[in-house]
Amino acid sequence: MSETVVRNRALQTEWYGEPLGDRFRRLLDRLGLSQSGLAGVLGLSPPMLSQLMSGQRAKISNPAVLHRLAAAEELAAEPGFDELSPADLKERLHRIRGETATTTSGIRVTTERVPAQSPVRALQSLLRTVASANEIEQAATLIDVGYPELAEVLRVYGNGRTSEAEAHLSRTLGS
């Protein structure tokens, strides 16, 4: 393995929590897509997806692609995912593909009419836009002793799954 690939995978782990190849492979398996199909959903060229997967490139430079990746991962992690029909899955992936831009706060903007982003996803997008998974964990560790509830918020919303964050919000606000 070349020094560049080792360095790029280490950077990916710092920025995205793990090498992108691992994240993409899980999605390929879970969504039943080819690399070309996943590239289309994310808004990447197939060669760029391949370079990110193999560690030849380190960074997703387009914030909209990163948000589409998060949306695809959230879809794959939904409790009812296995019950989705092929047509429903195709429609959901089409909606994710339509997410074309982000604001400076990280909130997704789309070209299609879709339900408004949940407060949980908006907060996750914001945290993940301003800090890497590693930075969020470091911040949580720094404040954990004096402010454990705030540290938990950083960990749950910054690095946790959407379902965990939604459960936390429900418990915390009693809704």
Image (cartoon, rainbow, N blue to C red):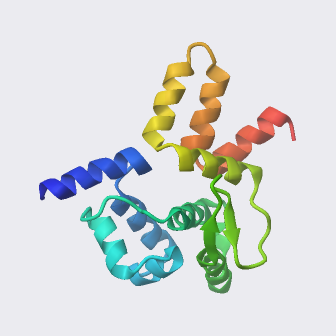
**Residue 52 shown left or right of residue 77 in the figure:** left
**Residue 173 shown left or right of residue 74 in the figure:** right
> Dividing the picture into quarters, in which one does residue 109 lie?
bottom right
- Quarter the N terminus occupies: bottom left
* Outermost residue, top side: 146
Q: Residue at x 63, y 48 (%)?
A: 126
Residue 31 % position (x, y): 51, 74
Up/down of 43 relative to 127, above or below: below
* Outermost residue, right side: 175
Residue 91 % position (x, y): 67, 82
* Outermost residue, bottom side: 87
Residue 75 % position (x, y): 61, 65
Up/down of 35 relative to 175, above or below: below
Up/down of 139 relative to 3, above or below: above
Q: Residue at x 60, y 77 (%)?
A: 93
Q: Residue at x 59, y 49 (%)?
A: 161
- Quarter the C terminus occupies: top right
Residue 56 % position (x, y): 24, 65
Up/down of 117 relative to 162, above or below: below
> Dividing the picture into quarters, in which one does residue 45 lie?
bottom left
Q: Residue at x 55, y 60 (%)?
A: 70
* Outermost residue, left side: 2
How many discs mark residues in the rendered view?
A: 0
